[in-house]
Image: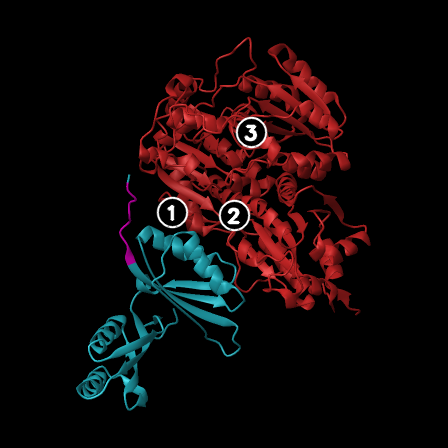
Chain colours: A red, B cyan
Amino acid sequence: MAEKSGADILIEALSDLGVEVIFGYPGGAVLPIYDAIFKQKKIRHILVRHEQAATHAAEGYARSTGKPGVVLVTSGPGATNAVTGITDALMDSIPMVVITGQVPSHLIGSDAFQEADTVGITRHCTKHNYLVKDPAQLGSVIHEAFHIATSGRPGPVVIDIPKDVQIATARYTKSGPIQHKTYRPQVKADKSLIESAVEMLAAAERPVFYTGGGVINSGPGASQLLRELAKITGAPVTSTLMGLGAFPASSDQWLGMLGMHGTYEANYTMNQADLIIAIGARFDDRVTGRLDAFAPHARKIHIDIDRSSMNKTVRVDLPIVADVGHALEDMIRIWKARQHPKPDLSEWWRRIEGWRAVKCLDFPEDSNEIMPQRAIRALWEATRDQAPIITTEVGQHQMWAAQHFHFESPNKWLTSGGLGTMGYGLPAAIGAQLGNPGALVIDIAGEASIQMNIQELATATQYRLPVKIFILNNEYMGMVRQWQELTYSSRYSESYSDALPDFVKLGEAYGWKGIRIEGNDQLDDGIAAMLAHDGPVIVDCRVAKLANCFPMIPSGAAHTDMLLQSAEVSGEMDDEAKALV
Amino acid sequence: MHIKEEKAERHTLAVIVDNEPGILARIAGLFTARGYNIESLTVSEITSDKAVSRITIVTSASPATLEQIVAQLDRLVPVHKVHDLTAEGDHVERELALVKVAGTGDHRIEALRLADVYRARVVDATTSSFVFEVTGSTEKIDKFIELMGEVGLIEVARTGIVAISRGKEAA
């Protein structure tokens, strides 16, 4: 068998792994790989305008298709620019493989031009990383990297390839199924644990399913199984930010999102439950609020594929290390085999209805200004029949979208949950559009966040991607301002978005259609015009400047200490509260 | 406001790892990144093909944090197994130190006499100095070094703790 260059081995291995799209940016240390890309037709390369955007685009592609996202960047600044997106993928468990070029082997450690210690820098923001020093190892490393990125708890894997290794030749043989000698994630739970979980669920008087991104990562089958388990048990379902869409928002068992900006009913249900079944969720601080007041009456079952998620912040009574889909399937089978009747939860539901009656997501309407919540609802009403893919940036608009845009199926909601990366939404929308060419993809943005990767307007133009950006423009870093109102007596330190560009003209300069919406009477027409345009559209929707996002559990407060309206937000907090994130 | 500290227990962990580049940085970095502390860390290859290393880590943490440390170590890709030797039962811990002492006359004679008591071996000698090799528990070595301080201690090199479970089973 003839030898191939490292670059050709890379492309062939990626092709063998079913990779169709790479998001990347060329540079000196990856020129051999770019030449190999030039000479083939199987893999499509998408040229972004900044390496961070390549990583978010790969995340958007991965989250919306279930396939791993692939990134190719050069050494030094190419790699360091990718670090934010790599960390984002680690925090949100997104399968991603990042190929970084490196200076030639003999120059490593010499502070060569565009040299950075990529494996050192990315060691703790990847699930695993490699420096490949021998082209003969390259093929097996790439196959192993995809195995690690996509199995168990998914995450980003970096492969750093020195330039000489891209040029040197070796033989490549396609790897068979990988039996890794140390990495063996547990996907099936012990039967006895599942039986205990079923018994606890059957005996519970006030159960609640608390679901997370793990349900979505486990694949569409897991979402179906969750629906079935909810149906046969009759228990209410709430979800983290990352898990939205796994359970249909139209179900009468749906409580909405829980946590800091979750619904009153979701948080009270968690607080008063006698059994919490956490499924693919990790008891994040945004979810639990004050730990010593979190779900004080509940026994807790935790199903997660990552053992280190167990008992990390909240002690649980029954940890079950398993893939969510497998565990749900086993629970349903055992529940049915034991012929458990559907429990009578009518008293529990009566209480939940009482919390629902608070109507915590209601907001004060204003005839002069567009309330941001109204804008999101109008967008949802206008697009719900098309089951759009929604991406977001980070801040108030993100929380309003999570509260007021409703999802019926998984892989439609792409947001930066764990890391909270402003600038995620536009590149993620580009990635999602590439993975779902026929879908309606909308980035719900804020005027501050959108500027963090605004250069990607050009990427959408180049590849004729009809993504839509819907900016809720309140001229503030709204969430920062909201916290300043809550904690620092409204001293708005650096949170005003001054010197804003004209987003309509900016869009037009990049070949986009620009639309401005300035009043309630323009809202529906503006959205209709956005949807009617067969191409990318940027919408500058001017909304009430000082609207705040409620409900809100202040950092370090209990689920029962929710703020429901603006009047409760003011003043100064003590140092203990200020120290919380 | 003041920073609060948790009550800590001292545990000895044995971590069996693939001997690949960067593994020590991965483990040490995990401890710093997550705010765990390392009191002692030793590492050496333990198979004839040099493919596997054993890392012995002594750490102090609350019981909940210790559970996390084990789980976090275990999820690193090149890690085969993690054993909390302190939690799993009886085990033996040993440390080796090389202790350089310089002096003449009574100091020199006293140093030799103490070394004999502590079963320290002389591994280097000149007319005005000794290097002792002493093994044992950390407490024993601490005490030996403290005593040498009174008879001309110059320099100390210690290995840190290695540990293994008692009985016929592997950890």
Residue A351 higher or lower than B56, as above or below? above
Q: Is residue A192 magenta?
A: no
What is the chain identity of the residue bearing mark 2? A
Which quarter of the picture shows residue A165?
bottom right
Residue A327 lies, in percent from the top left, at 50, 45
Q: Which residues are magenta?
A: B2-9
Dot 1 corresponds to which residue?
A311
Q: CA distance from mark 3 to mark 2?
A: 21 Å
Q: Is residue B5 magenta?
A: yes
SS at mark 1? loop
Q: Residues within 10 Å of mark 2 (few under 14, many from 20)?
A: many
Residue A248, label in figure: 3
Q: Is residue A425 visible?
A: yes
The secondary structure that most of the magenta stretch takes on is loop
Q: Nearer the viewer, mark 1 or mark 3?
A: 1
Which quarter of the picture shows residue A17?
bottom right
SS at mark 3? loop
Q: Amino acid at mark 2?
A: Asp
Q: CA distance from mark 2 to mark 1?
A: 17 Å
Dot 2 corresponds to which residue?
A323
Q: Amino acid at mark 1?
A: Asn
User: Left or right: B9 with respect to A440?
Assistant: left
